[in-house]
Each structure stands twice: as C-alpha cells, then as structure tokens.
Image (cartoon, rainbow, N blue to C red):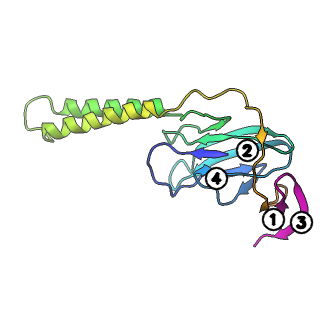
C-alpha cells in the first residue's frame, strides 16, 4: 500500500492503516507492505488529528488477495480536511481540491477588493497584489497536482516481492509470525 499526502504540510500526523479491524503498526507516508492471508480483506485508512475532525480523510475498501500475489492499493489524504480520502487501485485522486482552489481565489479577490476605494488602505497595495497573486498561483499548483482520475477496477495482482521476515500475524495482532517470502509459516513469537 502506498499512502500520499497533499502538499508540503507537517508529516507528524501519520496515517492509520486498519486491516480487518487490526491496526498495522508503524505505518508512515509512502510504501508499506502488509503480508496477509489470501482472501477478501477490509482496509480502512485515516489520518488522526488533534482538532475537529478527529479523523482526516477516512476511506474504506474491500480487496481480494490471491495466494502468492501482491495487491497494490493507494491512499491519498484529501486536500480539504473535511473531505473523504481516496483509497483503491492507483493512481487515486486528491479529494477536496476544488474547495481549496475556490477558497484561494475568493480570498485573493477579497484582498484585492479591500484595496479599492478611498485611502487609507489596511495594507500597502504591493503587498495585497503579491498575496493575491500567491493565492492564485497556489490554486493553479493545486489543480496541477490534483492527480489523475482514479481507476474504477482493481488491477491484476502482481507477484509478491515481500522480504522474508517476522511480521504481525494477520489474525492476532499480539503475535509475530514468520513469512518466508511466499507463505506464512507455523513459527510464531509473542510481540513485545
């Protein structure tokens, strides 16, 4: 799974990835490999936040995992924190871009409008025009980086290239299970 955030904002708010009701630990922005058993799995992603809303960009999907195959998913956090996130076969689109662009253009227009009329003006004209131009430029960049339209169908599964190692057991988050690169083994260890 690949998780992407919009823009250059703070990275301290890490995405939460929950597969079949179990939170996958240590998920960061970027690529995360989650070994699972074959079958259908429910995937939920959101970004925890300290203010309202408590969960930014919640998104859910069901995904089928074939034996010995890797299924790719992509999550994109929305540009507008009150929009839903995008989750599915990549590439996905950033939701809420239209709202952010509209707000930037409206705020830029209001700034310019405050400088019309008789003096005194609240800000120097060069400052207002520079700020308005910056907001419009940011709106253009938002539109360019919005991403392509999402693919409606799940792509064919790819051969797995998950490194052998100890991973959280897909059925019990308190247990680590050894994945040999192709299959789960019977070797387990308690999680500390």
* Magenta segment includes 72: no
Q: Identify the residue at image location x=84%, y=62%.
A: 178
Residue lying at 77% horizontally and 37% vertically, measured from the top left: 157
Using a 10 Å C-alpha cutoff, classify the residue at mark 3 as few (fewer than 14 neighbours), some (14 to 19) or many (20 or more). Answer: few
Residues at marks 1 and 3 touching, judged by CB atoms closer than 8 Å: no
Please, is residue 71 above or below residue 146 in the view? Answer: below
| Magenta-drawn segment | 176-192
Would residue 119 be found to the left or right of residue 104 on screen? left
- Decide which of tag 1 and tag 3 comes sooner along the chain: 1
Q: In front here: 52 or 141?
A: 141
Side (left or right) of 49 relative to 67:
left
- The mark closer to the camera, 3 or 2, is 3
Discs 3, 4 touching: Cβ within 8 Å: no
State the CA–CA distance, disc 1 to disc 4.
Answer: 19 Å
**What number is the disc on residue 176?**
1
Badge 4 is on which residue? 16
Q: Earlier in the sequence, mark 2 or mark 1?
A: 2
Query: How many other residues sit within 10 Å of disc 2, few (<14), some (14-19) or many (≥20)?
Result: many
Earlier-in-chain disc, 3 versus 4? 4
Q: Position of residue 190 (x, y in %)?
A: 82, 71
Question: Circle 3 sits on which residue?
Answer: 187
Mark 2 vs mark 1: give the one in front. 1
Mark 4 Cα-neighbour bin, 10 Å: few <14, some 14–19, many ≥20:
some
Q: Could you tell me how far apart the alpha carbons at marks 3 and 2 are, in whole angstroms?
A: 26 Å
């Amino acid at each position: 799974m690949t998780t992407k955030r919009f823009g250059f904002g703070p990275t301290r708010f890490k995405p939460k990835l929950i597969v079949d009701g179990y939170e996958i630990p240590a998920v960061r922005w970027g690529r995360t490999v989650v070994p699972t058993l074959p079958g259908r799995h429910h995937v939920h992603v959101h970004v925890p936040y300290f203010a309202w809303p408590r969960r930014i960009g919640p998104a859910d999907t069901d995904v089928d995992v074939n034996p010995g195959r890797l299924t790719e998913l992509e999550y994109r956090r929305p540009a507008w924190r009150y929009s839903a996130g995008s989750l599915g076969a990549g590439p996905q689109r950033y939701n809420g871009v239209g709202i952010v662009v509209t707000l930037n253009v409206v705020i830029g227009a209001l700034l310019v409008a405050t400088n019309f009329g008789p003096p005194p003006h609240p800000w120097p004209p060069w400052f207002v025009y520079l700020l308005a131009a910056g907001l419009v430029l940011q709106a253009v960049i938002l539109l360019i980086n919005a991403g392509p339209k999402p693919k409606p169908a799940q792509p064919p599964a790819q051969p797995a290239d998950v490194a052998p190692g100890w991973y959280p057991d897909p059925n019990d988050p308190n247990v680590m299970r050894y994945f040999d690169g192709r299959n789960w083994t019977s070797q387990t260890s308690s999680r500390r």
